[in-house]
Image: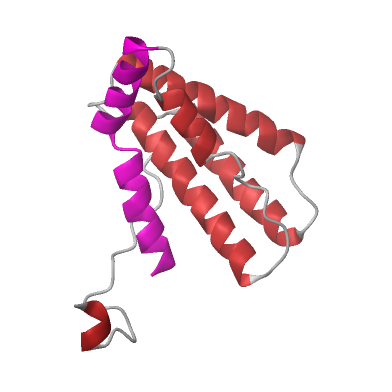
């Protein structure tokens, strides 16, 4: 369920039309919040989680979902060319960071290795790259959501 929630959120945040609007907003005023700032905030602590705790595991899953969503945005037909260029620059920045610091825990090393492999597959042929299959949201109300708490 956590992965499907992250995928839905990442899809909404990194939606091509929203990214294009952020770019246009920044063009209208230098003090405005833009796409580059949004990506910097989204990825500020990406791929830094060490250890095997549940929280660290969720962070690594989030990082890889966000990375795949950024790759999808960078090739999306509704993203304009400048949006795509900013996304590609961020992908290159992330690759450089991952290559220079792969971490010390085996879980982080595995996550970074997966991300770098995904970036390599994407880099070889972005149009053929598909990414991971989407995890569907479970049907029904959240577990433990009683009538009084949900309405």
Dominant secondary structure, magenta: helix
> Which residue is drawn at the image coordinates 39% and 20% (left, top)?
32
> Which residue is drawn at the image coordinates 60% and 33% (left, top)?
94
- 73 or 53, nearer to the observer: 53
Decide if residue 127 is in sight here.
no
Q: How is the image coloured?
A: secondary structure
- 130 or 31, nearer to the observer: 31
Considering only vertical position in the picture, is 126 above or below 66?
above
In which image quadrant can residue 54 be found? bottom right
- Left or right: residue 131 versus residue 99 is left
> Which residue is drawn at the image coordinates 42% and 62% (left, top)?
3
> Which residue is drawn at the image coordinates 29% and 24% (left, top)?
20
Residue 28 inside the magenta-drawn segment: yes
User: Where residue 73 sits in the image (x, y, percent)?
Assistant: 35, 33
- 30 or 87, nearer to the observer: 30
Q: Magenta part of the protein: which range?
A: 1-29
User: Where residue 48 sits in the image (x, y, percent)?
Assistant: 68, 48
- Quadrant where the image shows the N terminus: bottom left
- Left or right: residue 112 versus residue 38 is right
- Quadrant where the image shows the C terminus: bottom left
Considering only vertical position in the picture, is 101 above or below 62?
above
Residue 8 inside the magenta-drawn segment: yes
- Left or right: residue 11 versus residue 132 is left
Considering only vertical position in the picture, is 50 above or below 144?
above
Single out the residue that lies furthest toward the right: 104
- 121 or 44, nearer to the observer: 44
User: Where residue 115 sits in the image (x, y, percent)?
Assistant: 57, 44
Decide if residue 110 is in sight here.
yes
User: Where residue 146 sits in the image (x, y, percent)?
Assistant: 26, 88
> For the image shown, how many numbered marks are present on the structure?
0
């Amino acid at each position: 369920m956590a992965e499907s929630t992250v995928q839905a959120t990442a899809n909404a945040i990194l939606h091509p039309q929203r990214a294009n609007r952020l770019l246009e907003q920044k063009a209208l005023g230098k003090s405005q919040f833009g796409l580059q700032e949004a990506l910097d905030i989204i990825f500020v602590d990406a791929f830094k989680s060490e250890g095997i705790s549940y929280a660290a595991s969720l962070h690594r899953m989030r990082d890889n979902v966000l990375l795949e969503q950024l790759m999808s945005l960078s090739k999306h037909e509704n993203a304009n060319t400048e949006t795509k260029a900013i996304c590609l620059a961020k992908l290159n920045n992330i690759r450089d960071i991952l290559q220079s610091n792969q971490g010390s825990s085996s879980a982080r090393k595995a996550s970074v290795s997966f991300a770098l492999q995904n970036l390599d597959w994407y880099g070889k042929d972005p149009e053929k790259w598909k990414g991971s299959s989407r995890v569907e949201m479970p049907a029904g109300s959240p577990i433990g959501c009683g009538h009084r708490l949900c309405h």
